[in-house]
Image (cartoon, rainbow, N blue to C red):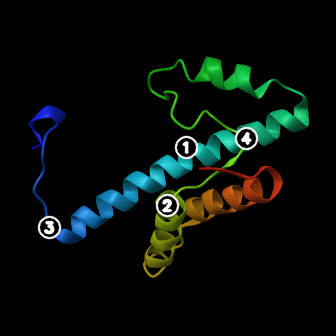
Amino acid sequence: LYNPLNKPIFRTDLKTAELIKYASNCMLATKISYWNEIFLICEELGVDSQKVVDIVGLDPRIGRYGTVHGKAFGGKCLPKDLKAFISFAEKYRNVRLLKAVDEINEEMKKRYGVRE
């Protein structure tokens, strides 16, 4: 069943598997909110945000994911998982970065709508 994926399969406990899913989705949400923050700054400065992301996205350490900017992230997983993980992780520490990711996404949602 999984052979065509040509990816490694990891065995782990349930708690670690859950954290992996949340960490992955929160990272993707962070990248999108980062580029939306750059979009908002470019808008204020009168700079072509697409040119900025096109050039910065060429760096293989950064990549292109999330560079489609200008709208909030939506869908079923990213917003839900981000909020759920913030709520969970706040019991252990102040998750300032993830809260900022959520705040940027909420601002983008109000100002520009949601990309599904």
Q: What x and y, as percent, mark residue 20?
A: 30, 58
Q: Is residue 88 left or right of residue 73?
A: left
Closer to the chain start, of discs 3 and 2, is: 3
In this figure, which residue is indicated by the disc labeled 1?
31
* Point 65% across, 60% down: residue: 100
Give the answer, above or below, for where 5 lies relative to 104.
above
Kind of residue at badge 4:
Gly
Q: Which of 110 and 102 is in front in this view?
A: 110
Closer to the chain start, of discs 2 and 1, is: 1
In this figure, which residue is indicated by the disc labeled 3?
13
Kind of residue at badge 3:
Asp
Instruction: Identify the element where label 3 is drawn.
Output: loop
* Point 61% across, 57% down: residue: 101
Query: Is the N terminus in the top left, top right, bottom left or bottom right quadrant?
Result: top left
Instruction: Identify the element where label 4 is drawn.
Output: loop
* Point 55% across, 50% down: residue: 30
Question: Which callout, 2 or 4, points to the residue nearer the camera?
Answer: 2
* Point 47% across, 56% down: residue: 26
Q: Is residue 49 visible?
A: yes
Disc 4: CA contacts within 10 A as few (<14), some (14-19) or many (>=20):
many
